[in-house]
Amino acid sequence: MKTIHTEIWNRALPFQDKRDDAGHAFITLEYAKQLVDLENGDPDVVLPAIILHDTGWSRLSREEWMVVFSPTATAEDEMVVRLRHQEEGVNIAREILETMDYSTALTEEIVEIISEHDTRKGFISNNEGLMRDADKLWRFSKTGFDADVERFEIEPQSLYDKLVGQIPSEGFFYSETSRQLAYQELERRKKEFECVMACQMEAPELIAMPTLG
């Protein structure tokens, strides 16, 4: 990663992972690096965009962003929150990039990607598609998968079934490379949770020892 991208990363750190999603920024950045290499993305756009895309959550209260995970929230409620975090993400991205004298043209492309990365229908460019794919791939990583199992109180197999059904759906992923990465990650998750289940079934029952005295 270029020195300037590392500087963007360092400046964005205070705004990262503010939604009980520790590791999100780092993991999505790693996916973005892979996709840039494999799908001919522009690292000067895709990497800053993925680094900065979710910084806007830092300016929302816990009560506000928890709406996204509430089973009783309406689609309208969730949309309001997502739009707000995108707007704040654009503000933070501009603040960071402009203070670094980052290219104006690149900055405009980056903030355009961030402005609707959660809500836009369809994809507007290769760079935008790759950044959004990297963001979605978080759900398939071990950290992201385990976080959703806990957050939504769902069985691993049920989450696996949900995700495997989303991969081929129209408009979910931009690139075929991302689809294949998602399938590969999901198979790893399946092996992991099946191994845990098998170990639990094979473990001998603990026999309570009588207390003395």
Image (cartoon, rainbow, N blue to C red):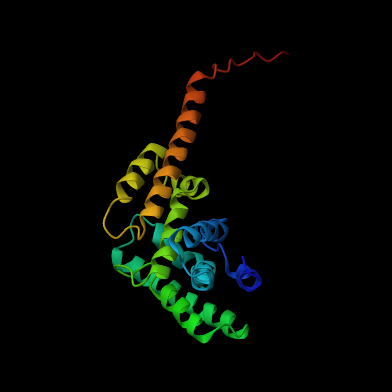
- 108 relative position to 51: left or right: left
Q: Nearer the viewer, residue 192 or 37?
A: 37
Q: Position of residue 126 (x, y in %)?
A: 39, 68
User: Looking at the picture, how far across and down is residue 167, in whole percent?
Assistant: 33, 50
Could you tell me residue 154's position as x and y percent? 40, 42
The residue lying furthest to the right in this view is: 213
Q: Position of residue 200 (x, y in %)?
A: 50, 25
- Residue at image x 54%, y 17%? 205
Q: Residue at x 27, y 53 (%)?
A: 169
Residue 183 in which image quadrant: top left
- Total tally of numbered discs in the picture: 0
As drawn, which residue projects farthest toward the left?
170
Q: Nearer the viewer, residue 206 or 48?
A: 48
Q: Say which of 122 and 117 sits in front.
A: 122
> Would you say 135 lies left or right of 30 here?
left
Residue 60 visible? The answer is: no
Q: Is residue 170 visible?
A: yes
The residue depicted at 61 percent of the width and 65 percent of the height is 1
In the image, residue 95 sits, relative to residue 136, either above or below, namely below
Q: Quadrant of residue 176?
A: bottom left
Quadrant placement of the C terminus: top right
Please determine whether, in this image, residue 123 is positioned above or below residue 100: above
Height in image: 181 above or below 11? above
Q: Quadrant of residue 15?
A: bottom right
